[in-house]
Amino acid sequence: MNRSLDDERVWEALASVKDPEIPVLSIVDMKIVSRVRASGTAVEVEITPTFAGCPALALMKDEIRKVLTEMGFTDVSVETNFTAPWSTDLLEPDAREKLRSFGIAPPPRPVQIDLGRALAEPVACPYCASAATHLESAFGATLCKQIFYCDACRQSFERFKPL
Amino acid sequence: MTTPTIESLLLAMADDELVLGHRNAEWTGHSPILEEDIAFSNIAQDEIGHALIWYTAYEKLAGRSPDQMAFERPWNEFTCARFVTYPKGDFAYTVVRQFFFDVAEEVRLRSFLASSSEVLRSSAAKILKEEAYHRLHTQGLVERLGDATEESRRRMQAGVTAAYAQALGLFEALPDEAVLVAGGVMTPNIELARSWIEAVAPVLRSVSLTPPVALTADAGGRRKKHLPDLEQLVTDLQSVYRLVPGGAW
């Protein structure tokens, strides 16, 4: 991918915008930002939502506009691409580690090959690393998470849904 | 290739998703157990997200925004199937209806993967991934509640009896369907209905739930022939927006 210096500055700035539902990861870590094109005082950003119904989307768009306006861009466009695919397979190892240290079990990979198998794999507790865990609720506090329970350290924890 | 008629297909699917999403959201705070409250609230949010995907695709062709379509359109302009408009009813009915819808979506979206329309192919691929979680959950509930106790059996059977013919209404032919089929955009609804019947049958049979014998598809929705249930729902859905039309909150 060819990135101009202007584009690079924008990518760096966007790395300060957090996913409000997972505040340890930025929207760049989450691979929500899918395209940046800066030219003079104009900038276009394309975002690809994780789950289509994610209610944090509007908030993230506002935050992107704010950050880029503060950088001096006067013409900021933020477009949502609903047709580009997004998958938890896109998350890099360091993003997965940040999730785990925040208490959210990262998704297994690669999901794209077989979701059924990914869901059947044991989930390690993000606190004590035990594999003696079970699914408590297939749905959680946000669209992208499920609730698990660790039978070893007796804590419930969240797991990022493989997608 | 896009033809003007694809707009009616996009809108029918968007309306189905939005209205069923709204019905499921009526369980938020009212479900029999906490886990199901969370599940149906999540499913509702997902379906409304899918409505946004289809309304956004519609906007690119027709110029009217998702908010305009959801909040400014009169209820009798919606083209959802009647199936999604019925009140949430007994929780067992909701479970059966959502399971029937999940299978219907799976059948329809899978058929889109081979569509001549790029927007249908890519949107279907995205939505199918989220939908897998819905079906996993609702089919699991049908299998557990279908033969758990005398009471759960009775209520689930009542749900199947009520929702089956309604679900077939999801496959009512669109007014311009022949053009879309000829253009390779979609598979005829009648074929999708057959696939749906074949897909739900083994699940129902596994817990001895039986579809009604004599039935006619509960059609009309795609031709805007709706029941007062939709008027009540749309009035409710649009009430806040209509306080300050176009206002930013």
Image (cartoon, rainbow, N blue to C red):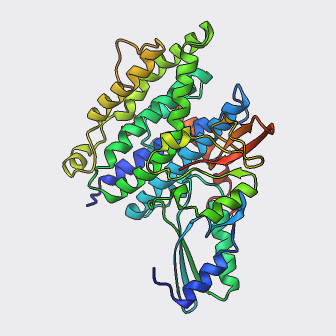
Q: Tell whether A85 sits left or right of B219.
A: right
Residue B224 appears in the rendering? no
Q: Is B196 drawn above or below residue B59 in the view shown?
A: above
Quarter containing the N terminus of chain B: bottom left
Q: Tell whether B155 sits left or right of B217.
A: right
Q: Residue at x 46, y 61 (%)?
A: B64
Q: Tell whether A20 sits left or right of B116.
A: right
Q: Residue at x 55, y 93 (%)?
A: A40
Q: Position of residue A125 (x, y in %)?
A: 72, 45
Q: Position of residue B94 (x, y in %)?
A: 57, 27
Q: Residue furthest left?
A: B182
Q: Which residue is drawn at 57% across and 50% down?
A: A108
Q: Which residue is drawn at 33% across and 48% down?
A: B112
Q: Is A43 drawn above or below residue A102 in the view shown?
A: below
Q: Give the quadrant of residue A7.
A: bottom right
Q: Tell whether B180 sits left or right of A83.
A: left
Of residues B70 and B102, which is closer to you in this image? B102
Q: Residue furthest bottom?
A: A40
Of residues A87 and B159, which is closer to you in this image? A87
Quarter containing the C terminus of chain B: bottom right
Q: Give the quadrant of residue A42.
A: bottom right
Of residues B60 and A6, which is closer to you in this image? A6
Residue A44 appears in the rendering? yes
Q: Where is residue A16 in the image (x, y as percent from the top left)?
A: 70, 74
Q: Where is residue A153 in the image (x, y as percent from the top left)?
A: 80, 39
